Structures are given as structure tokens and as C-alpha cells.
Image: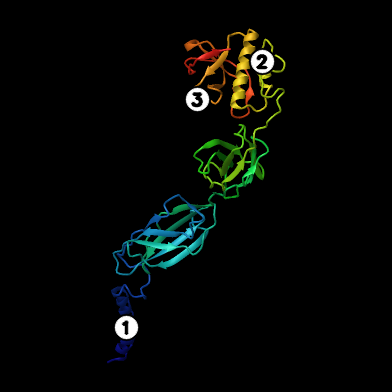
Amino acid sequence: MTRVTRVLLVLLLPLAGLAGCEATKSSTPTSPSVAGPIAGVSITTPVIVSPAQGLAISSTDQPLTLTIGNSTTNGVRTISYNFEVAVDAAFSSKLVSREGIEPGADGKTSLRLPDALASDRTYYWRAKAVDGANESSYSAAGSFAIFTPVVIQSPVPQKPISGATTSNRTPEFKVTNAVRSGPAGAIYYTFEISSNQTFTALIAVVTVPEQSVETKFTIAQELAASTKFYWRVKAYDSNVTGPWSLTQSFVTPAPVVTTPTNPGNPNTGAACDSSNPDTIVKCERNKYGYMSGSQIYNFLVASARSLNRNHIAGNPFGILRKSGSTCNGYSCDIICSGQGTGQLQYDVLGDAEGAQVAGWGSPKTYPNIRVDVCDIQ
């Protein structure tokens, strides 16, 4: 062999070695030594599954789990997934970046975030599949918002409580305002007052707007005397309603009994004479304190007679028979005139079992009355 031939062989041997390396790379595509994309391999883009696009998520439901639909590949290399979470749609400010997430066995792959995200802002996320040499495109970016939920606690009743007797029959109700968290709107309070603890016999339902520190109101109607009542209250805004407070109770005072000018006897004292029927009826009423059923009967008889004596329009007047009444067999609050469907009935004693306030108003007529015998006095 000549010297020239030997030189050519020495020069060709390194080139033969290089050709051998290139053949090894393309014949073992699963080898970690492969660098760069492998021709002909295609990986589909993963699809975001949850959280759904634009979903609003309570800050209490964290940390979140991100789930995608798996990609497919025609290559032989195993794929894994990269996840990204950012505060902007361009993913220039990433909060989470995780690589090498192994595929799930059910056609979906999930990543549970390590920490809770800050509330009251929107986030963006995406994923892509990689096999170490090839990769898919990023999925379409998903977005979700984390919000602070509104929580409204129950108000705390202040008065009347613990079965105490109130100073009057139109008590004031007062509560310490409900504690709340989150972006609550305008708060209102609903009070329920009932004659039983199950609140199936409601006496009043009152709603008032929240006041500073404490919310209170005075009930407009006069409650029955010497009666135990129960009440509760809850707070709410336009979206959230808080729980009922603890039930409280109170007792109304006994009726106020005034000393009559001429107790018990409607035929004593000054005559009740006037051209005004309201004046006459109130004059007769002032002859009594708190009246029994028999005294109410006497009051009605005396009122009818005084109305007739003073020739009040609509006379002659009488009292209305009513079977089983506690007022000697007559209505406890009606003065009447006429019979049948032409009968007029005047309610002259408001709340006969309560305050027994006398007065004269417009008559009620048929068919809005039950017609009974009017005993003219």
C-alpha cells in the first residue's frame, strides 16, 4: 500500500464513524439521546375540561384542580403535559408552571394547584402535550374568576328577650346587626312575631333596612294584653339570606284599668246629652273602668237610650241579639237600628276584649252584616 493510500484511509475513517452515529439516532426514536423533533410525529392539542370557561369559583373551594382531555400521538414516545396559570391572557405573568404531568388513565389528566389563588380576580390557564422531542400546540386558554363569597350571620336579639314583661303593648324590638363577610349589598332585617314557638301563628312580619350598629323598630299594632309572644329575626341582601336568630319571648302587660266615674251602674251620674252620637257613646263609656260582659251590656243599653233621647239621626236604636254571647245574649260591641236587610249596625266598642275604646262611626249594611233582631231601647 502506498503512502497516499494510507493517508486516504486515515481521513475516511472519521467520516465513516460520523455516518454510523446518524444511523443510531433515527433508528431508536425513544432513546433519551434524541434531540429535536422527529419527522412524521404528530401530537394533538389537549382540550380544557374544567374549570369551565368563565366559571366563577368561591375562594372557599380551593386549591383548584385543572383538568384537560388527553392528547393523542402517532409516535412511539410517551407524552406528558405542561400546565400554566397566569393573571393575563398573554401569559406574560405566570403564577403556576408545571411540567412532566403524567397522563390520567381515564382519558383526562388533572393537576391540583399547590396553593389557593388570591380572591376577586380573573385567571387564565392552558396546557400542552410533549414527548421530549415533539410537542402539541397549547390548548385554547381557559379563564375563571375567584370570588369572596358573601356570608351573613344571624343578628343577636337585644330586646325584648327572656320572657320579660314589656312596659306596653307596642314594644320596641332591637338587635345587634348581623356580622357579614364578602362584598355584601344593602342589608335588611325581617322580624317575625308569633303566638307560638313554631311560628305557625304569626301576629306580624316586619322588614326594616339596617341601621348603624343596631337595628330596631316599634311595632305599629297593639298586641293582646297579658299574652306571651315569640319572635325571631334574620338578615339578608339581594343574593344571600342569613340564618334565623335564636327565638326570644316576651309577655305583654295586663290591660290598664281606670277607675270609673260611676262604676257598675249606667243609670247614675250625669245624663249623656249631645247632638253628636260620638260624644254620647264616649260619655256612657266613661262611666266604667274595664267592663265585664254584664257591664258592656249595660253600657250598650244606656248608649242606645241616650241616642234615642237626643233624637240622633237613624233612631230608634237598640242592641243586637247574638246567641251565646257573653254580654247577656247580645253582641258585645254593636248598636243597631232597623230590621231585616234594611238594618244598620254601628260598631261602638273597638276591641271589646282588650282596650274597650268607644266611638261612633259609619254603619255597616246588608249584605256585609249578619242580620239579627235589633231590640229597640
Would residue 176 be visible to someone looking at this image?
A: no
Amino acid carrying mark 3 in the image: Gly
Label 1: how many Cα within 10 Å (few below 14, some 14–19, many 20+): few
Q: Which residue is mark 3?
A: 324
Comparing 211 with 135, the one in front is: 211
Label 2: how many Cα within 10 Å (few below 14, some 14–19, many 20+): many
Q: CA distance from mark 2 to mark 3?
A: 28 Å
Establish if 57 lies above or below 313.
Answer: below
Residue drawn 31% across the image and 63% down it: 73
Comparing 94 with 205, the one in front is: 205
- The residue mark sitting in front, 1 or 2, is 2
Q: Which numbered circle lies on residue 280?
A: 2
> Where is residue 128 shown, x and y percent of the image?
40, 61
* Earlier residue among tags 1 and 2: 1
Instruction: Tell me, yes or no, whether the two marked residues, 1 and 2, touch with CB atoms within 8 Å.
Output: no
Q: Give the quadrant of the N terminus.
A: bottom left
> Where is residue 238 shown, x and y percent of the image?
53, 41
Would residue 65 be visible to someone looking at this image?
A: yes
Residue drawn 41% across the image and 52% down it: 52
- Left or right: 274 as drawn, with respect to 236: right
Amino acid carrying mark 2 in the image: Ile
Instruction: Tell me, yes or no, whether the two marked residues, 2 and 3, touch with CB atoms within 8 Å.
Output: no
* Earlier residue among tags 1 and 3: 1
* Earlier residue among tags 2 and 3: 2
- The residue mark sitting in front, 2 or 3, is 3
Instruction: Tell me, yes or no, whether the two marked residues, 1 and 3, touch with CB atoms within 8 Å.
Output: no
